[in-house]
Amino acid sequence: MTRSVVLDEDDLALVEALQRDPRAPWTEVAAMVGTNAVTASRRWDRLRAAGAAWVTGTPGPGSHHAQVLAYVDVTCLPSEKTRVASELAGDAHALSVDITAGGRDLMLTVAAVDLPTLGRYLLERLDRVPGVTGTRARIATRLYAEGSTWRLGVLPSNGGSGGPPHLTRPTVLDDVDRELMSALGEDGRASYAALAAATKISQPTARRRVDRLISSGAVLLRTEVAAPLAGLPVMVVLSADAPAGRLDDAAARLGRLRQVRLSTTLAGTPSLLVVAWLASLEEVHRFEQELSHVVPDVVVVDRLVVLRAVKRMGHLLDVEGRATGTVRMDVWSDPVPGEQ
């Protein structure tokens, strides 16, 4: 198999500019990376066509009856890991699917509109998939860092906090909002004309609704990159504990570490989940040492290394992390239609 050339500095700078503002006009993006709008737009079109980078809008916590998010460890029959991962990647509620090493076979990020829907997915869909031998779900209580706040770190700091977005009052979603969210899930930079056409509303209405969805946190925009092509081929998942009185502070400080893509507290034991992207396996222990130095309250109790990312927030990935297709992130739908 021929390996793709890693992304160059100009590519990475463009990706980070869009990480800072995923729907920024090309004139603003170009100013951030020191080029012109036409060149920036063409370069982005090339990256997106190659599946090397993309913008997506994921369901966020700022909606009425905010979604329930769970991280699910799955064990499989030895010969069934890849097939099960591929099957689950087609599920709307399984936003991300990773094949892992370190005691479990798969890790899923599962979202649902409420606890009953989550339970239906776990008990009546996931547990019944042929080849699955066991599951363990841990429900997130609060996200302190996630993909929309993570940065490559190749551009000079702009003084932003990089923390979770400030949310306004929860938004009640209707069918049009959900259609807009699905369209943004496929392309977070879709034009207002395209979004209006997809939902059969006017462009001004599309603009107003999208702005409301983003500002309320009902949609979290994130600019993704094929991690191996960005020089970050190692994804490590750490389960950790911290004293109850220090849990929030520990999770917040973990979320500020440059390697961390996810820092969340969990309703269960262990109480923390941390995901980091690293340049090599050698960095795994160095990262843990840094973590222990910066956040001494935290004790790592388990580790997983991702062998292959199969799906990330609705986007199907190839072995090099490039996006090859999308699955609608419909967290409101019935996980097992026709079986009531």
Image (cartoon, grey):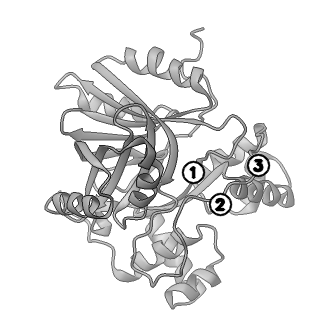
Identify residue for label 1. 186
Q: In the image, what residue type sits under mark 1?
A: Glu
Q: Residue furthest left?
A: 282
Q: Quadrant of the N terminus?
A: bottom left
The label nearer to you, 1 versus 3, is 3
N-terminal of the pair, mark 2 or mark 3, is 3
Q: Position of residue 7 (x, y in %)?
A: 33, 73
Label 3: how many Cα within 10 Å (few below 14, some 14–19, many 20+): few
Q: Secondary structure at mark 1?
A: helix
Identify residue for label 3. 169
Horizontally, residue 277 falls left or right of residue 96, namely left
Query: Residue placed at 64% from the left, 73% from the top?
Result: 24
Identify residue for label 2. 190
Horizontally, residue 219 falls left or right of residue 274, namely right
Label 2: how many Cα within 10 Å (few below 14, some 14–19, many 20+): some
Instruction: Answer above or below: position of 122 versus 38.
Output: above
Q: Quadrant of the C terminus?
A: top right
